[in-house]
Amino acid sequence: MRATKLLIAILLLAGCDLASSAPTTTTRGSDSDAGPASSITSPPGAAAEVIHVFDGDSMLVSINGEEAEIRLLGVNAPEGSECHGDAARDTLAQLVDSGDVTLVTDADDTDRFGRMLRYVYVDGLNVNLALLANGDAIALQGGHSAESDFITISDAAAEAELGLWAADACGSTPPPSDVEISDYVYNPDGRDEDNQNGEWIAIANTSGEAIDMGNWILRDESTQHRFTFPDGFHLDSSREVRVHSGCGEDTPAHLYWCADDPVWSNGGDTVLLQLADGTVVGHSRFSGDF
């Protein structure tokens, strides 16, 4: 199964032309400008040796004898404790199994934890893209040069129900097909911080019976924001519930996240609705205002 998935990734990548997504910043450890983020030829970058793979989107490498933590740019894989987390890590470990990788810089140099943000290449294959093509990660909307291609590949994997997008990814029965993300407001009037309840996601039950959504999960594309539906919450037939980012008193039609800050990025985000075990029920992507 794993070999089949990787073959699918390579076939998808072979048809993805990234020539228009050309990082032009200089990589650490290299005086050359990075070329296109191509899946055919590795652009100039810093040669590194993989020491350890932490999870599906981060690893420890050695660059000229110096250890550094790498966070794969533009992707977010499930955490090890989450559904499909171990599988995502296994995919990354297999892709970089040779130990020799090329690291290419684009957009921001480091993340908020100080890890180096990089495209990772192995023998001309863009590893970041391969993870997306396998369904082992979600494309992040952060403004890097290859973002459009990453989103295209990620959405294709979701449409094909590969990896984390599969109905049986978490070992449960298939999710209901009649619960959907029906509407949203991600950029309410005024400052988001002052109008968190103006930011909401609507979920509709189009079936002929009530559905138990207790402990289901609503989340964004990052690892930061997770909302768990109250235990025992039922969405009645032909009804809709709005999940507001701010605080309030829950009702059958309105639930309140009470998040510490606005949840949905105005620059673009992905809404995911999951069963309690992590199985994806539905998702929706908005491109944002920036």
Image (cartoon, grey):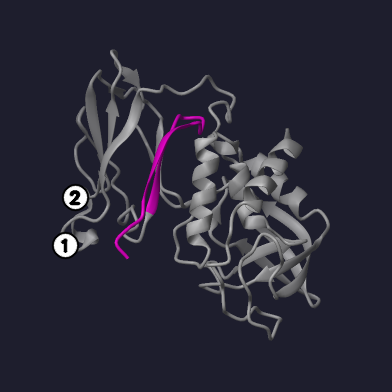
Picture coordinates of residue 204, whole percent (x, y): 27, 29
Report the side of 58 relative to 209 (left or right): right
Q: Label 1 belongs to which residue? A: 190
Discs 2, 1 touching: Cβ within 8 Å: yes
Q: Is 279 a magenta residue?
A: yes
Task: Residue lying at the far right in this picture: please name it.
Answer: 98
Picture coordinates of residue 268, whole percent (x, y): 37, 56
Q: Amino acid at mark 2?
A: Gly
Q: Would you identify the image quadrant in which residue 233 lies?
A: top left
Residue 230 appears in the rendering = no
Residue count near mark 2 (Cα–Cα under 10 Å), binned few <14, some 14–19, many ≥20: many
* Up-down relation of residue 132 to residue 211 (above or below): below
Q: Amino acid at mark 1?
A: Gly
Report the side of 30 relative to 182 (left or right): right
* Chain part drawn in magenta: 269-290
Q: Which residue appears at 51% of the width and 73% of the height?
A: 108
Q: For the C terminus, which image quadrant?
A: bottom left
Q: Which one is in front, 201 or 224?
A: 201
> What SS does tag 2 mark?
helix
Q: Which residue appears at 54% of the width and 66% of the height?
A: 113
Q: Which residue appears at 70% of the width and 45% of the height?
A: 91
Label at residue 198 = 2
